Image (cartoon, helix red, strand yellow):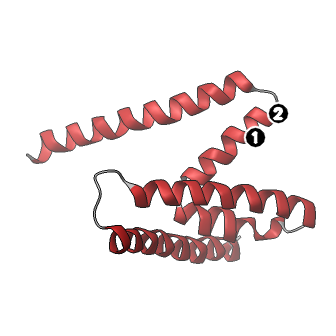
Amino acid sequence: MFPTFLQVALGGALGASARYGVGVGIVRMIGHQSFPLGVITVNIVGSFLMGVFVTVAANRGLTHWAPFLMTGVLGGFTTFSSFSLEAMNLYERGAVGQAALYVGLSVFASLAGIALGVWLARQAFA
């Protein structure tokens, strides 16, 4: 069990560092933008890579790499990739309504959660 935690931790450090690097690289290439290009880039690329890995791993018997690559590297790179995988799994199982509910709740409840957190923190520390 502990070696798996180490795999996830190492992968997470690599993924988070890569996310930071992409953000810095985009700012250096095109300058600061009001639209979060770095975040959307890692979300899309991370989701793409999650889709590639989950498919290849299932077909080639590489699922033992999942803690390091999926949870660690891609989870550290962007948690959006995990969200996308779960939504796709629901959809592919034929649970279209659940997939739509999951997507809607994830997006709107997360936005509501951050708004509430900001509001509470501002009330407490303002």
The residue that mark 2 highlights is: 93
Please give the name of the residue rendered at 80% of the width and 36% of the height, measured from the top-left corner: 92
> What amino acid type is highlighted by mark number 2?
Arg
The residue that mark 1 highlights is: 89
The correct choice, above or below, for 29 with respect to 92 in the image is: below
Residue 93, percent from left and from top: 82, 33
Residue 71, percent from left and from top: 64, 62
Label 2's element?
loop
Please give the name of the residue rendered at 47% of the width and 53% of the height, measured from the top-left corner: 40
Residue 28, percent from left and from top: 34, 75
Question: Mark 2 and mark 1 in contact (Cβ < 8 Å)?
Answer: yes
> What amino acid type is highlighted by mark number 1?
Asn
Residue 105 is labelled as none
Label 1's element?
helix
Q: Nearer the viewer, residue 53 or 2?
A: 53
Please give the name of the residue rendered at 63% of the width and 45% of the height, measured from the top-left corner: 84
Please give the name of the residue rendered at 34% of the width and 50% of the height, measured from the top-left corner: 35
- Residue 36 sits in quarter: bottom left
Q: Nearer the viewer, residue 122 or 53?
A: 53
Q: Residues within 10 Å of mark 2 (few under 14, many from 20)?
A: few
Q: Is residue 25 left or right of residue 31?
A: right
